């Protein structure tokens, strides 16, 4: 039904009841720059569905039911500036899904069910300025994953996740703050979900307390080991002296017997 629209630049199909996109959906839509498919019932993005819309700049897939995207779903979209996937059901941000998105500036993934970001998933995004991850299921993140964002300035939005506030998490956010081109926009709103004694507190209000316990236990272990070593040395020295005394006494005795 869209096959005569090869000069069409904007297409708005939002607020419909689309359940899937046919494989040849984009076959004649080669001039398309903006495609709105938000507020539909899409569950999956097939690898072929968007492959001929190579000029696409904006793609809005927000508020659908997308659980998974084919690894090749976006490979033709190398000019994409904005990708909105808010309000879907994604669980994992996978390596390779965004491998051609060097031009992507805005990636909106808030209000999904994302609990993991694979280690290379963000690496291709050289132009990213905004990464929205609010309202997901993130408990922990790895510093290395975010360090792979080789950009000039990226704003990260990370609040409304069930963060596990431990020393490790505090260190990760601490390190991110020292990376000049990364900026956690809503750091003050990073609220701890667990452990229970931290629940409801903001990570920022913990200062460096979460690592104090860890540092203290390292200190205790170090001191214990040192005391044990010193004890052993003292004992060895005492034994040596005792032996010396005994042998001197024996020698003296022999001498006395001789007389
Ligand atoms: C959300 O992710 C969790 C795993 O983190 C999974 O058990 C659950 O089924 C997911 N929910 C939906 C609606 O996909």
Image (cartoon, helix red, strand yellow):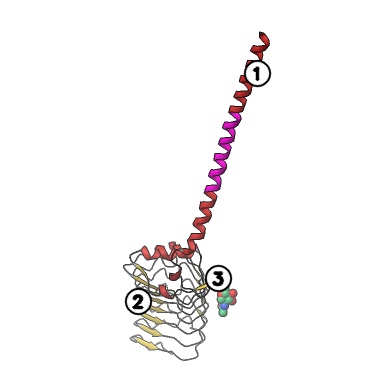
Rendered location of residue 222, percent (x, y): 52, 48
Helix, strand or loop at disc 1? helix
Q: Which residue is mark 2?
A: 81
Q: Which one is in front, 33 or 41?
A: 41
**Which of the two marks, 3 or 1, is nearer to us in this view?**
1
Q: Which mark is residue 250?
A: 1
Answer yes or no: is residue 119 visible: no
Q: Which one is in front, 213 or 38?
A: 213
Eyeballing the image, is 95 above or below 55?
above
Locate residue 34 relative to residue 203 in the image: left or right: left
**Which of the two marks, 1 or 2, is nearer to us in this view?**
1
Rendered location of residue 9, percent (x, y): 33, 85
Q: Which residue is mark 3?
A: 197
> Residue drawn 46% across and 65% down?
170
Q: Residues within 10 Å of mark 3 (few under 14, many from 20)?
A: few
Q: Which mark is residue 6?
A: none
* Quadrant in the picture for the C terminus: top right
Eyeballing the image, is 249 above or below 215?
above
Q: Which one is in front, 110 or 73?
A: 110
């Amino acid at each position: 039904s869209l096959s005569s629209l090869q000069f069409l630049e904007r297409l708005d199909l939002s607020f419909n009841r689309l359940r899937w996109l046919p494989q040849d959906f984009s076959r004649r839509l080669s001039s398309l720059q903006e495609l709105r498919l938000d507020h539909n019932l899409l569950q999956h993005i097939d690898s072929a569905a968007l492959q001929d819309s190579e000029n696409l700049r904006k793609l809005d897939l927000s508020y659908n039911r997308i659980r998974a995207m084919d690894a090749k779903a976006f490979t033709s979209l190398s000019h994409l500036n904005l990708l909105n996937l808010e309000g879907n059901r994604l669980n994992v941000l996978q390596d390779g899904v965004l491998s051609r998105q060097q031009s992507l500036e805005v990636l909106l993934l808030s209000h999904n069910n994302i609990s993991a970001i694979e280690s290379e998933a963000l690496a291709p995004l050289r132009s990213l300025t905004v990464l929205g991850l609010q309202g997901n299921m993130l408990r922990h993140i790895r510093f290395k994953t975010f360090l792979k964002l080789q950009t000039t300035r990226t704003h990260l939005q990370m609040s409304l996740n069930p963060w596990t506030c431990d020393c490790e998490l505090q260190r990760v956010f601490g390190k991110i703050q020292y990376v000049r081109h990364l900026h956690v926009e809503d750091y003050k709103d990073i609220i701890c979900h667990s452990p229970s004694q931290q629940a409801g507190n903001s990570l920022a209000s913990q200062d460096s307390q979460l690592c104090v316990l860890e540092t203290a236990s390292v200190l205790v272990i170090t001191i214990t080991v040192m005391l044990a070593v010193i004890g052993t040395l003292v004992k060895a020295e005492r034994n040596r002296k005792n032996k010396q005394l005994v042998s001197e006494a024996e020698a003296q005795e022999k001498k006395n017997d001789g007389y």
